[in-house]
Image: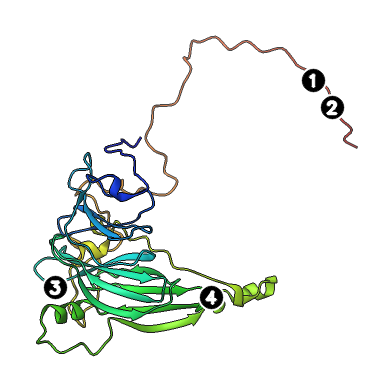
């Protein structure tokens, strides 16, 4: 069973609780820093002054600690935290960016600071359909994930490249020239009606088909996903899961037993060879014969067999 570590009653107005300024209507987005401590982006849909608050969960048994800084987000927004990995100093270090899709028709990209009490830097603002859904695809050895984009109004599925790291460096140093590629670069798109063309034969209009991506990477930084444990692959190299250092384990031949020496499967034996067991039962030579049982005449089986 799950144990309750902290419990409180959330008011309708976040101002009603100064120790824990969070209402029951808030939309939450959980993310992690390099220290693997969870934090939360809370957006108040009914807030008047400050709609966004950043909380840091340093102690699960106590109220979340609000941070002094937060990005400027609208009341109605969909959030997705995206993680990128640098080539140095270690394979498990990463940084985070927040993608915020406003229902009014734009997406804002923020860089998450390592110190959450520092300002969040706005990297870019892009025109985007307000009903867009996002999903990340993390490829081991790649510094940035791919992004799946789907919109019911556009009725298209898009595969995009993210160039967050280059744009973040430009924001940190104004002397750098702007990147040639946009922060979100569309590489491939197709109509949603082409995903399941067989539906037309089943009496379903393909133009009514809507497929929305669903992101399931909220706990990626604290998981054992290969993207987390694999260092960045140099340009031109191939990802080999069995290579030393790519997944933290020494390489081994394919189909070899992964356990320590001597703990593999049992040795092979010739086919149809009986396994060793207890000796068979043999009666004593001087034992009397077993008494014969009564003759049983059960007659023909019931039913008509003709």
- Give me the C-alpha separation between circle 1 and circle 3: 85 Å
Instruction: Identify the residue shown where x is 39% and y is 27%.
Output: 278
Q: Residues within 10 Å of mark 3 (few under 14, many from 20)?
A: some
Apparent side of residue 127 relative to residue 155 in the rendered image (left or right):
left
Instruction: Identify the residue shown where x is 53% and y is 75%.
Output: 195
Vertical side of 268 occupied by 180: above or below: below
Apparent side of residue 128 relative to residue 49 in the rendered image (left or right):
right
Nearer-the-camera pick, 291 or 183: 183
Place of residue 249 in the rendered image (x, y in percent of width and height, measured from the top left): 18, 59
Mark 1 sits on what residue? Answer: 298
Say what secondary structure mark 1 lies in. loop
Mark 3 sits on what residue? Answer: 87
**Colouring convention used in this rendered image of the protein:** rainbow
Residue 195 — which label? 4
- Give me the C-alpha separation between circle 4 and circle 2: 61 Å
**Quadrant showing the C terminus:** top right
Q: Nearer the viewer, mark 2 or mark 1?
A: 2
Q: Which of marks 1 and 4 is in front?
A: 4
Please indicate, yes or no, whether residue 182 appears anywhere in the rendered image.
yes
Place of residue 286 in the rendered image (x, y in percent of width and height, measured from the top left): 49, 10
Residue 302 — which label? 2
Nearer-the-camera pick, 74 or 112: 74
| Mark 4 in CB contact with mark 2 (< 8 angstroms) | no
Say what secondary structure mark 3 lies in. loop
- Give me the C-alpha separation between circle 2 and circle 1: 10 Å
Place of residue 257 in the rendered image (x, y in percent of width and height, measured from the top left): 27, 54
Place of residue 50 in the rendered image (x, y in percent of width and height, measured from the top left): 27, 60
| Mark before the other along the chain sequence, 1 or 4 | 4
């Amino acid at each position: 069973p799950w144990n309750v570590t902290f419990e409180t009653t959330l008011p309708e107005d976040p101002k009603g609780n100064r120790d824990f300024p969070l209402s029951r209507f808030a939309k939450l987005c959980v993310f992690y820093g390099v220290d693997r401590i969870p934090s939360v982006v809370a957006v108040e849909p009914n807030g008047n002054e400050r709609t966004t608050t950043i909380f840091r969960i340093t102690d699960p048994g106590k109220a979340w600690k609000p941070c002094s800084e937060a990005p400027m987000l609208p009341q109605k927004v969909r959030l997705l935290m995206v993680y990128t990995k640098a080539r140095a100093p270690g394979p498990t270090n990463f940084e985070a960016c927040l993608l915020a899709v406003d229902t009014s028709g734009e997406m804002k990209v923020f860089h998450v600071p390592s110190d959450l009490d520092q300002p969040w830097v706005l990297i870019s603002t892009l025109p985007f359909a307000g009903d867009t859904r996002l999903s990340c695809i993390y490829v081991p050895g790649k510094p940035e994930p791919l992004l799946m984009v789907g919109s019911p109004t556009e009725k298209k599925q898009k595969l995009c490249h993210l160039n967050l790291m280059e744009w973040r460096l430009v924001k940190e140093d104004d002397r750098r020239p702007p990147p040639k590629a946009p922060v979100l670069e569309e590489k491939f798109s197709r109509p949603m009606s082409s995903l399941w063309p067989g539906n037309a034969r089943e009496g379903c209009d393909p133009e009514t088909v809507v497929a929305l991506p669903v992101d399931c990477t909220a706990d990626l930084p604290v998981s054992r996903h290969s993207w987390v444990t694999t260092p960045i692959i140099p340009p031109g190299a191939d990802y080999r899961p069995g290579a030393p250092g790519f997944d933290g384990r020494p390489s081994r031949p394919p189909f070899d037993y992964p356990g320590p020496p001597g703990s593999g499967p049992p040795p092979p034996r010739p086919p149809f060879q009986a396994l060793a067991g207890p000796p068979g039962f043999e009666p004593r030579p001087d034992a009397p014969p077993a008494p014969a049982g009564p003759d049983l005449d059960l007659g023909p089986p019931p039913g008509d067999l003709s």
